[in-house]
Amino acid sequence: MELIILFGVLAALMIFMSSRTRKQQKQQAEFRSSLEPGQEVMTGSGMVGTVVDVDEEADIVTIESTPGAQTRWLRAAIAKRTDTSVADDVTGVADDTSDAGSIASADGDVDVPDDLSGLDTAQREYQENKRRENGDTEDK
């Protein structure tokens, strides 16, 4: 009897997980089909650029990352829009740049260190500023 219940629970979990995956895939397909020139997007590999052209027949999107530097990508390689929060609703990703520890500046630029040593320094500076704000004067 317990074995039948176990198989029933496993079957229910598999059905639930597969329906959730299909829903996410459908949302991604709808997002990719709505791509048009002028939108800022990010590829699955992390390249950010502006859509210049969409070839519907070949499913190829031309992206300009810097002025004059255009690259062609399969439509399936486009992961999300980065210019509005509408894309976040479609992909299910929340935009949380309001965090005090965020590395994004007010104008949206991201400060990326040249090497990993800057990450430790930035963390220490952040913690030190937090202590000062809280009134702690001793260094721990």
Image (cartoon, helix red, strand yellow):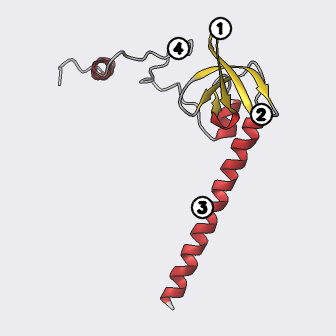
Q: Residue furthest right?
A: 57
Residue 102 image offset from top left, x and y in percent? 45, 23
- At horizontal 60% and vertical 38% (from top left) the residue drawn is 93
User: Badge 1, how many Cα within 10 Å: few under 14, some, many 20+?
Assistant: few
Task: Give yes or no for contact between labels 4 and 2 (Cβ–Cβ under 8 Å).
Answer: no
Q: Which mark is residue 68?
A: 1
Label 2 sits on residue? 58
**Residue type of the residue flagged with mark 2:** Ala
Label 4 sits on residue? 109
Q: Which mark is residue 93?
A: none
For marks 4 and 2, the one nearer the N-term is: 2
User: Badge 3, how many Cα within 10 Å: few under 14, some, many 20+?
Assistant: few
**Residue type of the residue flagged with mark 4:** Asp
- At horizontal 52% and vertical 14% (from top left) the residue drawn is 109
Q: Quadrant of residue 50?
A: top right
* Up-down relation of residue 60 to residue 25 (above or below): above
Task: Say which element carries label 2.
Answer: loop
Residue 39 image offset from top left, x and y in percent? 72, 22
Residue 81 image offset from top left, x and y in percent? 66, 28
Q: Which mark is residue 17?
A: 3
Task: Say which element carries label 3.
Answer: helix
Closer to the eye: label 1 or 2? 2
